[in-house]
Image (cartoon, rainbow, N blue to C red):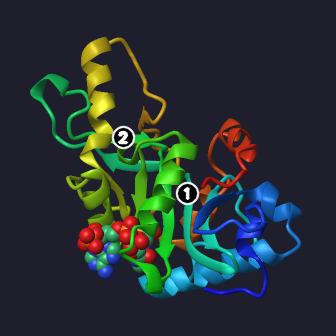
């Protein structure tokens, strides 16, 4: 999607830089922006929504809060967008072992980093750009794909995750998010190892008074968790603004 200005330059690309690059946009960048970054996010958000058949864009150029957007661009062209952020979810853990009766089949409250929006322009899908964009995000967020949640992943995203990361098995949840079975591996290992009240950072026993997110399309729930997520997490990423080549 072409713009009348240098999108890659906005992300910090040096003059004369060739080839697609990925840049990170967070709330601080949006606030310092003269409006061009917002325009790019707004338009890419609309494209993404249309590609997924969503009524409303998930990504807008107005406000990011604790969420972050990874933008793939080349010169004046925006090629793809990937938005991530933490969500508090109630999910059912998969059946594992009789030894783990305390967690077996029980609902857990977790707050993983989630893929909220992911889109590569139609003209260049299936040419590895999605993989480039997703890989940079994983690197900067210092996370493995199985440690993430996925907000109502499309069949294309499910195929993408299976192909590039071998992720496939997951228990259907009633909140539209997908958490792969592999997410629980560390949790279960820790449970077997410790059995001493260990609570992994991404997984806590459910607290029924909290409102879980219900996934995309449930706007009021989405709004209610927009600003959730540890402040430290946001601070850590504010400084990671340089583009990755
Ligand atoms: N049909 C089936 N699988 C597909 C398709 C498709 N049309 N497009 C991509 N994939 C999967 C396949 O596994 C494919 O491998 P293959 O070509 O060997 O079959 C693989 O992705 C290709 O990997 P990349 O080229 O790195 O990925 P791409 O640049 O196409 O980006 C993305 C993947 C972002 C899912 C892109 O296809 C897209 O924008 N799709 C439309 C929007 C969408 O569905 N986004 C996800 C919404 S869900 C969410 O955001 C939480």
Q: Is residue 30 left or right of residue 149?
A: right
Q: Disc 2 designates what residue?
A: 108
**Residue 105 falls in image quadrant:** top left
Label 1 CB, ligand 1: below 8 Å? no
Residue 88 visible to an observer of this rendering:
no
Q: Tell me, for residue 84, which label it has, or none.
A: 1
SS of the residue under disc 1 = strand
Q: Residue furthest left?
A: 98
- Which quarter of the image is occupied by the N terminus? bottom right
Ligand 1 shows up in which quadrant of the image? bottom left
Above/below status of 93 relative to 34: above
Residue 83 in the image, given as x and y percentages of width and height: 57, 62
Above/below status of 195 relative to 143: above
Residue at 58% from the left image edge and 68% from the top image edge: 20
Residue 104 in the image, given as x and y percentages of width and height: 20, 35
Give the mark count: 2
Residue at 27% from the left image edge and 39% from the top image edge: 106
Residue 140 in the image, given as x and y percentages of width and height: 58, 45
Residue at 52% from the left image edge and 44% from the top image edge: 139
Residue 3 in the image, given as x and y percentages of width and height: 72, 86
Cα–Cα span, label 1 and label 2: 21 Å
Q: Is residue 75 left or right of residue 99?
A: right
Residue at 27% from the left image edge and 33% from the top image edge: 185
Q: Who is closer to the viewer here, 76 or 157?
A: 76
- Which quarter of the image is occupied by the C terminus? bottom right
Above/below status of 228 relative to 18: above
Q: Who is closer to the viewer here, 177 or 50?
A: 50
Please name which of the two marks, 1 or 2, marks the residue nearer to the observer: 1
Residue 243 visible to an observer of this rendering:
yes
Q: Is residue 48 left or right of residue 69?
A: left
Q: Is residue 28 left or right of residue 42?
A: right
């Amino acid at each position: 999607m072409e713009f009348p200005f240098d999108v890659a330059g906005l992300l910090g690309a040096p003059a004369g830089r060739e080839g697609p690059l990925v840049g990170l946009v967070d709330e601080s960048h949006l606030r310092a922006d003269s409006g061009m970054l917002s325009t790019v996010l707004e338009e890419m958000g609309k494209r993404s929504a249309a590609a997924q058949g969503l009524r409303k864009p998930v990504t807008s150029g107005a406000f990011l809060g604790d969420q972050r957007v990874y933008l793939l661009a080349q010169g004046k062209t925006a090629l793809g967008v990937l938005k991530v952020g933490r969500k508090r979810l109630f999910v059912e853990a998969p059946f594992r072992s009789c030894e783990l009766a305390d967690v077996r089949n029980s609902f857990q409250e977790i707050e993983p980093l989630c893929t909220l929006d992911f889109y590569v322009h139609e003209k260049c899908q299936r040419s590895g750009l999605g993989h480039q964009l997703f890989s940079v995000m994983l690197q900067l967020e210092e996370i493995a794909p199985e440690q993430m949640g996925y907000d109502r992943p499309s069949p294309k995203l499910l195929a993408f995750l299976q192909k590039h990361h071998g992720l496939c098995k997951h228990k259907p949840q009633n909140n539209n998010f997908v958490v792969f079975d592999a997410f629980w591996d560390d949790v279960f290992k820790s449970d077997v190892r410790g059995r001493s009240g260990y609570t992994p950072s991404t997984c806590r026993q459910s607290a029924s008074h909290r409102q879980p997110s219900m996934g995309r399309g449930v706007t009021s729930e989405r709004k209610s968790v927009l600003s959730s997520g540890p402040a430290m997490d946001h601070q850590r990423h504010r400084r990671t603004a340089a583009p990755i080549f």
